[in-house]
Image (cartoon, helix red, strand yellow):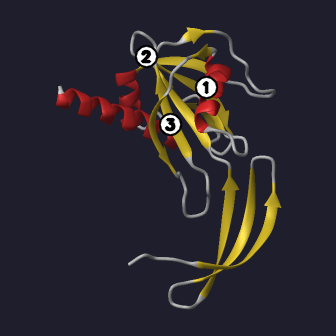
Amino acid sequence: MAHFEKQLTEELRYGGKIFDVKSHQVELENGKTSQRDIVYHHGGVCVIAFDDDDNIFLVEQYRMPTGKAILELPAGKLEKGENPMEAAFRELEEETGYMTKTLSFVTEFYPTPAYCTEKITVFSTRNLLKTEQHLDENEFLDVVKVPFEKAVEMVYNNEIIDAKTQIGILMMYMQRQKANHND
């Protein structure tokens, strides 16, 4: 059976720079009504960038909700209507100071589909060309190179706690395992 909810009303509760919040009254499958508060976000991208020695580039930056600096894949938000691949090219160079001419799709996912429209698209790349960082105003981060196998261990040891980074690294690991199994 296909489950559904019918939207009855919609009200903007907050309009912000990064996201909007709307409240919806919906009719449920059983005919009753309920309220759904939804965060509307344009989405984001992240990039698993490998150097020639199979290291990946992570960025370390302070994240206020966690109360500490954490390691993440280079990432950023999409502008309204922006193509995810274009954003990934931009964010890789802005945050790491490296660019690439090719990106490969890894996966896409909704981190919190119960209340947010954000979809994150993950790409990977090799053949990096050194340029320079172009950090946004008031963006502070350090670039850290980590051997890929160590990054996988860091996910399993809960040293990398960012979900998009965990998912990206583990999906890349699974792709490699599958490719090695098929050889």
Lateral position of residue 59 relative to residue 149, left or right = right
The amino acid type found where label 3 is placed reads: Val
Q: Which residue is label 1 attached to?
A: 89
Q: Which residue is label 2 attached to?
A: 55
- Residue projecting furthest to the bottom: 31
Front-most of 67 and 7?
A: 7
Residue at disc 3, secondary structure: strand
Q: Residue at x 63, y 35 (%)?
A: 68
Evaluate whether residue 162 shows in this view: no
- Alpha carbon of mark 2 to alpha carbon of mark 3: how far? 17 Å
Locate the N terminus by quadrant: bottom left
Lateral position of residue 114 relative to residue 56, left or right = right
Evaluate whether residue 171 shows in this view: yes
Quarter residue 170 falls in:
top left
* CA neighbours of label 3 inside 10 A, class few (<14), some (14 to 19), many (20+): many
Q: List x then y, in percent, for residue 111.
A: 53, 51
